[in-house]
Image (cartoon, rainbow, N blue to C red):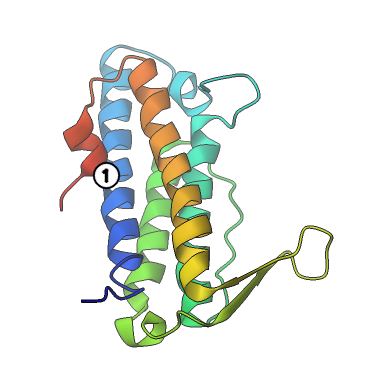
Amino acid sequence: MTISLYAASVPVFKQMLNSVSDILKKTEEYATAKSISPDAYLQARLFPDMFPLIRQVQVACDFSRGISSRLAGVEVPKFDDSEKSFADLQVLITKTLAVLNALTPAQIDGQEEREIVLRAGTPKEKKFNGQAYLLTFGLPQFFFHITTTYAILRHNGIEIGKRDYMGAY
């Protein structure tokens, strides 16, 4: 039995983005209850040379939109990544989920051999077929940023666990 590119991408992105949304709600509630500045979490990092939480969420959203759109052969929606608050991140996730919800299995399935070119015309140009792009580049990138989001919050005292990370499945 084979698995479709759509099944391996869009539903996975949606599940994990919904879990991040829920985790961010818990974080905002905790910060409010404890009178902690939201920026204490939004700007938190695991290490000084890593992105802060707010950027981790932005990049996870960017990857989910970009991967899915490229596989579907449609233009990647550009968002400005100017979020500054928990509310802004929730709007970003909602907008990203809307992009994902607009894509259909028919647009993505069967695109295993579609050529995906990243950073075209630069020394960093990388070419993939659709399947390799999703499995060896896209999903690992997406999960890195989702996992780092979780780790930043857990490290900073938010009481979340594996069930929170996994979300509804």
Looking at the picture, does residue 132 appear above or below residue 102? above
Residue drawn at x 40%, y 80% is 108
Quadrant (top left, top right, bottom left, bottom right) of the N terminus: bottom left
Residue 92: x %, y % from top left: 44, 53
Residue 116, quarter of picture: bottom right
Residue drawn at x 27%, y 64% is 11
Residue drawn at x 32%, y 14% is 157
Query: In this figure, which residue is indicated by the disc labeled 1?
Result: 19
Residue 39: x %, y % from top left: 49, 23
Instruction: Report the side of 158 relative to 82 (left or right).
Output: left
Residue drawn at x 30%, y 49% is 16
Q: Residues within 10 Å of mark 1 (few under 14, many from 20)?
A: many
Residue 84 visible in the snapshot: no
Q: Tally the numbered discs.
A: 1
Instruction: Report the side of 139 relative to 15 (left or right).
Output: right
Looking at the picture, does residue 62 appear above or below residue 67? above
Residue 163: x %, y % from top left: 17, 36
Residue 127: x %, y % from top left: 66, 70
Of 63 and 109, the residue lying toward us: 109
SS type, badge 1: helix
Instruction: Report the side of 120 relative to 151 (left or right).
Output: right
Q: Amino acid at mark 1?
A: Ser
Looking at the picture, does residue 158 appear above or below residue 50? above
Instruction: Report the side of 120 relative to 85 (left or right).
Output: right
Residue 20 visible in the snapshot: yes
